[in-house]
Amino acid sequence: MAYLRLRQLVKSYDGKSNAVDRVSIDVERGEFITLLGPSGSGKTTTLLMIAGFETPTSGGIELDGRNLVARKPYERNVGMVFQNYALFPHMTATNNVLFPLKMRGFPKHEIGARAEQMLGLVGLRRFADRYPRELSGGQQQRVALARGLVFNPDVLLLDEPLGALDKNLREQMQVELKRIHREVGITMIYVTHDQTEAMTMSDRIAVFCNGKLEQVGSPLDVYNRPANRFVGEFVGDSNFFAGRADPARPGWIQLSGLGPVRIAGDLPAGEVDVMIRPERLRLQRPDEGDGMDNLIDLIVDDTINYGDSVLVIGKTRGLPLRARLSSKDGAALGPGAALPLAWAPADAHVLARR
Amino acid sequence: MPAFRGAGLISRDSLTAWLLVAPAVVCVVVLFIVPIGYVLLLSVTDPTVSLDHYRRFFTVPLYANVMVNTFRTSLIVTLACLALGYPLAYVMARRDDALAVILLAAVGLSFWTGFVVRTYAWLIILGNKGPVAATYAFAGWGSPPQLLFTSFSSTLGMTHVLLPYMVLALYGVMRKIDPSYMRAAESLGARPFGAFRLVFLPLSLAGVVNGCVLVFTMCLGFYVTPILLGTPKDMMISQLISQQIEDLLAWGFASAIAVVLLACTLVLLGIYNRFAGLDRLWG
Ligand SMILES: Nc1ncnc2c1ncn2[C@@H]1O[C@H](COP(=O)(O)OP(=O)(O)OP(=O)(O)O)[C@@H](O)[C@H]1O
Ligand SMILES: [Mg+2]
């Protein structure tokens, strides 16, 4: 059975709308799972319920088979790293890390060594005697991490812990955090609204929207096979086309305004949405392909050059279309240029319209 | 000539600055420094040039008693304000609901109601037609104890008058304590009282120091409330000054006492200055 189970979790602050709406997730021991979703989608509320700072309106939380809901935060063995770090300003880094050990009654003779070892793990041994205000944002982040990990919690919750850092430091900390996760092996629940971060760090991603859980799956699953249009649009860049699948013509979908296209795999019948990721579109070359490719023309409106690639924004027969091309193919495209593009039948993902 | 223009700008800026502070400077000099200088001068020249007034103040037991009484009363008032004000400020700072707003409004109202008015209120409450006397009469306990014109009533009155200062000083600092500290403490295993003792209390100490110094120094020189509610038997220093001037026309001696009072206040503010950095240190 799963290690941490959220069962039909509901939280309503005002009694009318649900900030978290019937969320069920099973988290495995040692897993790194990310809650991803736009602002106000209930990610923090979910964490606060696991930590014990908010009481669920209904539903259950089980850790290792034991019910957590009735316990106070200090009775749960759940660590939390806050977005603003919440380091105690009147304590040095060491004393911050010692705090949970003292509170949780670890034997006096071992807490010093434990705190030191944890500060070593996050690479801060040299700064042990500094106060939080004497540390940079990234260093404070590490202290907060050490403090959250040092008492060996069953689960560590992290609420947008990298949100306040600049891009370079963020990426560095992402790598660091993954390394620490590997080394300590503690189950981590990570909250972010940055989909790249979720993609690169997680074992699994849980996508939230308006308090509801839209999909749980591995990063590639969520990216390549989104459960619905919201997930497809929120995770990564995407093109969506409305279409119709006729059971009489298997392997084909009639896109409205664009005509029939070949699609691989089993298709639902009836009204569908077809998603094509911009990077799956490529420049059509006369001598390439197996003759099964779908062709599409892009009239360029604008280009955004990322250096390693170019995002071309335009239209195809009046419908918006975005393509990500290599910087070689995408260079020197001006507005009004017509680009012949191609995509393979396996590159699309088809969703039944609800 | 950018350098030249720059130089011109600076002097114009500083001229503006001087013009802006000039009225305040004039006020401070005319209304504050000159009178204090005059008091200082009087204390060593009236009626003859000598330090006799100071010697008398510190050697005659009656006056030393006034000093002791003033400090003791101020200390009691400060501690009473702290004991009453800390929980109040805590509730106001930690909650975001109607209760916090109501409490803040109540403290603000009593802050803005003049202390003379509030002092007179005690004259009524503790007087022989007031609710205390009425309760005694109603219960048939005979005549109530003498409450008015005792050091009890003057201490009570000053505590009431100065409480808002304490609460606002505490509230200002407590409000800046991030609520996530308390959550962090609990998630790290601290029980609510432990979180308060180890995290909130130390972070609120700057407010405690601010509030105590404020209340204590105001209390040292307090005049109206002890005069109206207190007794000449347990005189505060300001009562002594007024008595020397009004009854005995002893300007020189009164000035010397005033200088001692001022010196005490300055010493306290000096100590406070050393600790005032506390909140910035941790903030
Ligand atoms: N203490 C509260 N009282 C009332 N409503 C709240 C409270 N906290 C959150 N909400 C509401 O609950 C919903 C979910 O909020 P939550 O903080 O969980 O979102 P989130 O996914 O963490 O968003 P963000 O990415 O902006 O942090 C929001 O609509 C929010 O307004
Ligand atoms: Mg949040």
Image (tube, coloured by chain):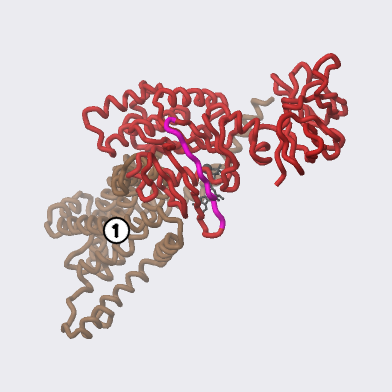
Chain colours: A red, B brown
Tell me the kind of residue under disc 1. Cys
Depth check: give the residue in front, A165 or A209.
A209
Number of residues whose C-alpha sits closer than 10 Å to that of mark 1, classed few (under 14), some (14–19) or many (20 or more): many
User: Front-most of B176 and B153?
Assistant: B176
Query: Measured along the vertical axis of the image, is residue B170 above or below residue A323?
Result: below
User: Which residue occupies the foreground of this view, A314 or A220?
Assistant: A220
Q: In the rendering, at what x and y percent does residue A297 appear?
A: 85, 28
The residue at 29%/50% (across/down) is: B265
Residue that mark 1 sits on: B81
- The residue segment tinted magenta is A17-30
Residue B103 is a magenta residue: no
* In this rendering, position of residue A189 left or right of residue B142: right
Residue A96 visible at all: yes
Q: Chain of mark 1?
A: B
Residue B47 in sight from this viewpoint:
no
Q: Quadrant of residue A295 in the image?
A: top right
Question: Is A182 situated above or below B186?
Answer: above
Residue A19 position, x and y percent, is: 54, 51
